[in-house]
Amino acid sequence: MENKLLIINANTVFEKKDDKYFGYKSRFGDIVIGGVYSYRFVVHYAKTNQDVVIIPGDANTVTTPVCTTLEERLWKPGAQAKACRDEIIEQAKADIEKLANKYGYYYAYGRNTKAEFIVNCEKRTVVTILRWLAEGQIVAKGIAKAAPDDCYNVHIGRAIALRRALGLAVPDEYLNAPRPTEVRVGDFISDDSGVNKALVIEDDSWPPFSGGAVIYLKDARKYCYRIIDDSREER
């Protein structure tokens, strides 16, 4: 009875079957009932929503809202969330290379194509354009755009845009990567308005000659600015 009440009162319920999680119920309407979700998606969802329950394959052994089993905790502290995001970013980088052949071309729509990545950090977008090798004709486009409250990452953006251009499914972890929990050198941070942003630099370094606002790492951590871009790629 206690387990049934837990399910009834929950806002969202997932049911675990083998290594997959299926949407079981959602009062928010943001989960597809019967839809398949990854472990990382459920981790992120459980961290950012209240009253999330996971059924580990047996409705009579419902776990607490942040656990898959009594032994396996689903809730991830900040340090683990940071490692999880880093892992997803590395996965995205590897994904782009893995989808290409040994010549660096992508097979799509019956022929080999070359990909062009257009990065716009100001608009927080990445566009992938696929062209036929010989003619140079555009055959497909894919677009990735970070949500206003999300942290932009060009590597994840490239992987999403490329997969969309190729007509491939985009993994849940790319779309729902946990936000970075710790400011690091190379990040771009902003105040709450999102208008004033600065590049985070080493505490003992000189500001770059390229101009633009900068902030020392110790100050960025001290004042808890919001991380808006953790691509850490030269621009």
Image (cartoon, grey):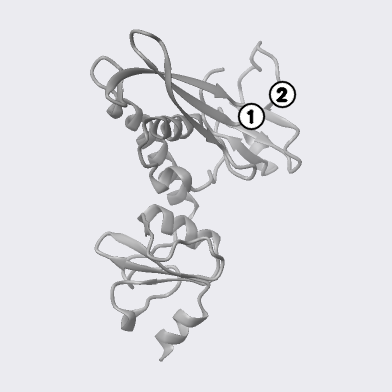
Q: How far from the left and from the top, in percent, is residue 199?
A: 64, 27
Question: Which quarter of the picture shows residue 230?
Answer: top right
| Left or right relative to 85: residue 107 | left
Identify which residue, 5 or 215, lies in the foreground. Answer: 5
Identify which residue, 68 or 167, lies in the foreground. Answer: 167
| Left or right relative to 186: residue 197 | right
Residue 172 is marked as none
Q: How far from the left and from the top, in percent, is residue 179?
A: 53, 46
Question: Which quarter of the picture shows residue 34?
Answer: bottom left
Residue annotated with mark 1? 123
Q: Residue at x 74, y 43 (%)?
A: 192
Instruction: Examine the rendering and report whether any part of residue 177 can be seen.
Output: no
For residue 53, above or below residue 165: below
For residue 212, above or below residue 179: above
Q: Residue at x 45, y 61 (%)?
A: 32
| Kind of residue sitting beneath label 1 | Lys
Q: Are marks 1 and 2 in contact (CB under 8 Å)?
A: no
Q: Residue at x 45, y 31 (%)?
A: 161
Q: How far from the left and from the top, in percent, is residue 14?
A: 40, 68
Q: How far from the left and from the top, in percent, is residue 78?
A: 50, 52
Identify which residue, 95 or 31, lies in the foreground. Answer: 31
| Kind of residue sitting beneath label 2 | Ala
**Image quadrant occupied by the C terminus:** top right
Secondary structure beneath disc 2? loop
Instruction: Examine the rendering and report whether any part of residue 3 can be seen.
Output: yes
**Image quadrant occupied by the N terminus:** bottom left
Distance from disc 1 to disc 2, alpha carbons, whole Å, reads 18 Å
The 10 Å Cα crowd at callout 1, few under 14, some 14 to 19, many 20 or more, is: few
Residue annotated with mark 2? 213
The 10 Å Cα crowd at callout 2, few under 14, some 14 to 19, many 20 or more, is: few
